[in-house]
Image: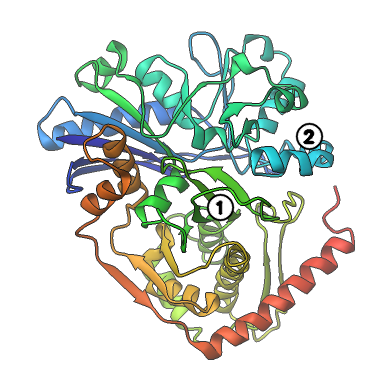
Amino acid sequence: MRILVLDIGTTSMRGILYDEYGTQLALSRRENHLILMGDSLIEENPDDWYHNSVSIIREICQAVSADTFDMIAVTSQRSSIIPVDREGMPLSAAIMWQDTRNRQICRQLEQYNPQLYEKTGAEVSTVFSGSKMTWIRQNLPEIYPSVYKFLNIPEYVVSRMCGVYVSDTTYASRTGLMDLRTETWDPDILKLYEVEENKLCRLIQPGETAGYVNKEFAEACGIEQGIPVIHSGGDQQCAAIGHGIIEEGPVSVTVGTGGFLASALCQLPEQLPKGMIINRSSAPGQYIMESNVLTCGAAYDWCAKQLYGMNAVNYRLLEEELKKENFVSSALVIPYFSGKGAPDWNPMADALISHVTTATRRSEIFKSVMESVFIEISSCIDRFADTVSVTKVYSGGGLTGSAVLNQLQSDIYGRRLICFDDPEATAKGALAVALSGMKVYPDLHTAFETVCAERSESVYEPNRSLHEQYLKKREKMNRLYQLLKEGGFYES
C-alpha cells in the first residue's frame, strides 16, 4: 500500500510517500513564497499551493516509477483564508494566518470573549480565520458579491484535487465560528461575524474521505483518477499525534515558523482553562489544548537576514555563533515580531531589543532573541501544567535540527526534552490518522505504534543552574512587557 502525505507548511510544503508501515519511499519539497507588505500584511498567491502540489506529485511518481497511490492524506497550516468564486478560482491573494489587518475587527469583538470562549474554545484573535472573512466582507466590496466559499489552504487544495468543498472539524475549530461541543457552525456566532454559513465548507471528521481525485487534477499530475483524498486534520493536531500525544500528559512543542504547543484532552473540563485554546483533535472524540508563540523560526530567519546579512540561511555558521555564548545573554528581548499570542492576544505588540551596550556582541543578541522565544514557550508549558499533569515535553519542527537550540530549550523549560530524529512528525501523524480512518488499522494508537515503530530520539537534560537564571530573565521580560503595555506603546 502506498500513501502520499501532503504536508503544507507556511514557508514550504512537502509530499512524502509512505507504505502502510511508515517506511518513507520518496520525498519532494517545494518552497512557498510569502508576500510581506508591511504593517503586518502578509499574503501568498494561492497558485503556489496548486502548482507545488502538481509538481511534488509528478516528482514522486518519477522517483518510484508509479502513476497511482492508494490514498492521498492532506495536513496543513490552519488559519489562512482564500475567497473563491463559484468555479473555485481565487478572488484575491490568500490572507495568511500571521496577517493582522483584521485587528480592529477583533478589538470590536473582544467584548464577547467570555461567551465566545465558552462556545468555541478560543477568544477572539487575529490569527483565526473567521475575522479575516469579516474583513473581506467589510473592506473588499468589489469582490464580496462573487465570493462562493471562504477556504483555508487545505480546503483550497482539496477543492482543486476533487472539486468538492469539504473541511474537517480541526480546521473549523480554528475559525472561531464552530461550536466546540456540537461540531457545527454556530448561527449566533456567524451572525456576530457577518459570515454566511453557505460560504463555509461541509464538515467531516479527520480521517474521513473528503473526495476523490478528479480528471483535471489527475491529468495535470499524471496519476489515476479516483484516488481517495483524506483530510487528516490541521498540522499541529497531526504533529501532536506524530509525537505520540494521544493520551493526556505529554506536551508537544513544534518550533517552526511559529511556536505551537499541544496537549491531549480526553474530555472537556467543566471550566475551560483561561488563556488557552481548545480545539478539536485529530484523535477521535478528543480535544487538544493549545497555545502559541506567533514568532519562532521566523525570528531565527530574521536574525539570519538582518544580523548576518544572509539571503540563504547558513545553519552551520549560525550554530557556531550560538556556541560562542555559553551563558545567559545579558541582552533582553521582547520577542513579539508578529504580535503576542495566548493568553494576551495582543496584535499591536512588537519586538524590542534592550540592555545592549558597546560590549554586546552580535552573537549575544542572536542568542537572546532565541532565548526570549523559548522563554515565552516555557511560560505556556507552565500554564498547561495547571490543567494537565505535564509528564514529558516532545519537540519537533525545523529548529530541532540544532543541538544547541535543543539544549537551550531544555535549560529554559527546566524539563527533559525529547526530540525525535524523524523531522516529519506532522506527516507521520497525518499518515496514522489516514490509516486508522480508512480502517487499515483498528484504531489510532495501533496505527501510530506501527508507523512510528522505528523512530529514534535524542534526549536533553536541563542545566538547573541555567534554568534558575532563565526564570529570573523571564520575570524581567514580563515586567518590561507590562511597562510597555501600560505605557501605551502598543496603541495604534
Q: Residue 215, can we see it?
A: yes
Q: Is residue 434 above or below residue 366?
A: above
Q: Image check: 39 left or right of 321?
A: right
Crowding at label 2, few (<14), some or many (≥20) Cα neighbours within 10 Å? some
Point 72% across, 28% down: residue: 189
Which residue in the rendered view is the most extreme toward the bottom? 465
User: Dot 2 corresponds to which residue?
Assistant: 105
| Element under disc 2 | helix
How far apart are labels 1 and 2 at the CA level?
25 Å
Residue 100 spot, x, y in % from top left? 69, 41
The disc, 1 or 2, on the residue closer to the chain's N-terminal end is 2
On screen, 270 above or below 299? Answer: above
Image quarter of residue 385 = bottom right
**Colour setting:** rainbow
Q: Nearer the viewer, residue 17 or 14?
A: 17
Q: Which mark is residue 305?
A: none
Q: Is residue 423 above or below residue 9?
A: below
Q: Secondary structure at mark 1?
A: strand
Tell me which amino acid carries mark 1.
Met
Badge 1: how crowded within 10 Å, few (<14), some, or many (20+)? many
Horizontal side of residue 184 vs 350, given as left or right: left
Task: Say the numbered circle drawn on residue 289.
Answer: 1
The image position of residue 226, as x and y in percent, is: 24, 16
**Residue 61 appears left or right of 153:** left
Q: Are marks 1 and 2 in contact (CB under 8 Å)?
A: no
Badge 2 amino acid: Ile
Along the viewing direction, whichever of 348 and 436 lies nearer the viewer: 436
Q: Position of residue 279 (x, y in %)?
A: 56, 43
